[in-house]
Image: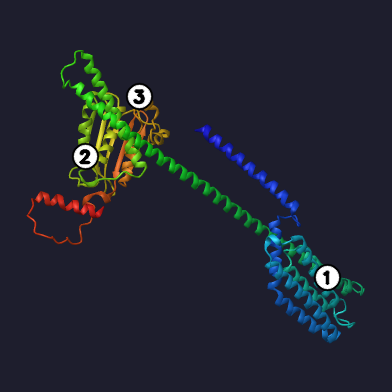
Amino acid sequence: MTTSNASDARKQAAAKRRRAASQRVRDARDRLTSTSGTSPVFDYELMRMFAQNRLSASLVVLLLVATVGFLSSLWSGAATAGIWTAGVLLIQAVMVAKCRQFLAMPVAEINIRAWRIRFIALDLFFGLAWMFNLVHPAGGVENTGTFMLFVMLLVVSVSSMLAFSLPIAVFAATVPVTGAVAFNFAIKGNLHDYILAVMAVAAQGYFLLLAHRLYSSALQTLQARAEKDMLIGELEEAKTISDEARHRAEAANISKSRFLAQMSHELRTPLNAILGFSEVMKNEIFGPHTVAAYKDYSNDIHESGQHLLGLINEILDLSRIEAGRYELNEEAIALVSAVQDCHHLIRLRAKNRKITIHEVFEPDLPRVWADERAIRQIALNLLSNAVKFTPQGGDIWLKVGWTASGGQYFSVKDTGPGIPEDEIPVVLASFGQGSNAIKSAEQGAGLGLPIAKSLVDLHGGTFTLKSKLRVGTEVIVTLPPERVMAALAPLAEPSPALQPREPSLPFERREGGPQATGKNGA
C-alpha cells in the first residue's frame, strides 16, 4: 500500500513538472510572437477593450469637444474655433469608424500590429489637435492659465480612462497636451506659472500611473479568465476520458458477466450427468460393486461434483447480479423461520466441528416483504463462513430482531480468528480472500460475502461487517422498515368482489390481507 502511494505521488509530481515545462514553453513562444510582450490572445482582447471604450465614450468626447470649441470661440474667434472643432471631430469620426471596423472583423483576419499602429496614430493626432488649441487658447489674451490647466486635466483624464488597455496610445494622446501646457507656463518666467507647470507635469504622471494600474488589472483579469477556461477545458477533457473509460469498463464487465453465465450453463449440462451417474454408482442401484473402493471413488466424484455445481451456481448468481438481470421473487416471509431453516441445514457441519450455535430470536416478529430464496442464500453463506473459520469448540451466535428504525435484522457472530481491518474491502470484493482464508484448509472461491452483500443491496438493506483479530467477526444484515409488513399502509378501501366468495378460515384471511397489502406497499 505504501509503495503504491509513493508511486502515485511520483507520477503526479512528474505530471506537474511536464505541465509546468509546457506552460513555460508556451509563454516563451507567446512572448516571441506577441507585439506587446503578452499572449497574442491578450493582445486582441486588450485591443478589443480599447475599441469598445472608444465607442462607448464617443458621445462624451463629442460633448467635450463642442464645449471647449464654444468656450475657445469667445477668445479666439468663431472661425478659428470652428476649424479646430471640425478637425477634432473629424479625427474622432475616423477613430469611431476604425473601432467599428476592428470589432466587425473576424479574429483570424485581424493584423494586431497594423491595428495597433493605426490606433496609436489616431490617438497621437487627437492629442496634437488638443495641443494646437491649448498653445494659444485665447488668441494672445492673458490670464488664461486656469482655462488651459482645466482643459488639459479633462483631456488627460478622459484619454487615460479610454486608452488604458493600450499604454502607448495613452502616451500619444496625453504627452503632447501636457508638454505644450507645461512649456507654455514655463516660458512665462514667474513663480505662479512655474507652479502651474509643475502641477501639469505631476497630473500627467498621476494619470499615467492610474492608466498603468488599470492596464495591469485588466491584464490580470484576462489571465485569470484564460486560466479558468483552460481549467474548464482540462476538466471537460478529463471527464470525457473518464466517461470513455467507464463505458469501456461497463462493457467489459457486461461481457464478462455474459461469458460467465454462458460458461456456467455449458458446464452445468455435463455436470448434471456426472452427478446423476455418480449417485447411481454410489448408491449401488444396479447392484453392489465387486471392488469396495469403487463405492468410495463414486462418493468422492459425487461430492466433488456437488462442490463444483455450487461454485458454478455462485458464479452464475454473481454474474446475473452484476449484469442487473437478477430479479427478486418477493413475498411475505418470516425472517426467523428462514434463518432457522438455514441453521438446521448447517447444524451437522457445526456439530462435527464441536461448534455451538446459539439462537437469540426476538418473539412475535411480523413478516417481511422479501425474496425467500435470496434471504436463505444470504444466511447460508454467512453461517457457512462462520462454521468454516471458527475453531473447534468455538461458538456462533445467530440473532434476529428489530432495528432502532423499525426494520428487522439478523446477524451471525463467531469466535474465529477475525479479519484485519485493511482486508475487509478485499473479502467483500468478488473472488477476494483474506490472509486467514488463504491459510485455511477449507479455501473457497471468495464469492459468498460478495453475493450476500449484493442480494442485501437489491433488497435496499445494509450489510455491515465488523471484525477484530483474535476476537471474531460479526456480520449484520438489516432490512429497511418499508419491508416490514406491519409497517406497510393498509388499502384505502377494498376493491369490490366481482362474484360472491365462500368464507375462508380466519387464518387464511390473516395471511391474504398482509400479502395483498405488502404487494401494494412494495
Secondary structure, mark 2, is: helix
Within-10-Å neighbours for mark 3: few <14, some 14–19, many 20+: few
Vertical side of 224 occupied by 23: above or below = above
Element carrying mark 3: loop
Per the model, the C-alpha gap separating discs 2 and 1 is: 98 Å
Give the residue at mark 1.
Answer: 178
Say which amino acid is labelled 2: Ala
Q: List the residue tagged with mark 2.
A: 338
Mark earlier in primary sequence (1, 3): 1
Relative to 504, does residue 184 appear above or below in the rendering? below
The CA distance from mark 1 to mark 3 is: 95 Å
Give the residue drawn at x 21%, y 29%.
347
Q: Quadrant of residue 210?
A: bottom right
Q: Which residue is mark 3?
A: 440
Q: Are marks 2 and 1 in contact (CB under 8 Å)?
A: no
> Which SS class for mark 1?
helix
What's the distance in space between the residues labelled 3 and 2, CA to CA?
29 Å
Rendering quarter of residue 310: top left
The crowd level at tag 1 (other Cα within 10 Å; few <14, some 14-19, many 20+) is: many
Precedes in sequence: disc 3 or disc 2: 2
Residue found at x 28% / y 26%: 305
Q: Nearer the viewer, residue 125 or 278?
A: 278
**Tag 1–tag 3 contact (CB < 8 Å):** no
Q: Residue at x 41, y 34 (%)?
A: 426
Q: Can you say whether 23 is above or below 257 in the image?
A: below
Q: Amino acid at mark 3?
A: Ser
Q: Which badge, 2 or 1, comes first in the chain's sequence?
A: 1
Q: What's the amino acid at mark 1?
A: Thr
Mark 1 against mark 3, which lies toward the viewer? Answer: 3
Furthest toward the top, the residue is 291
- 328 left or right of 180 in image: left
Q: Is residue 150 visible?
A: no
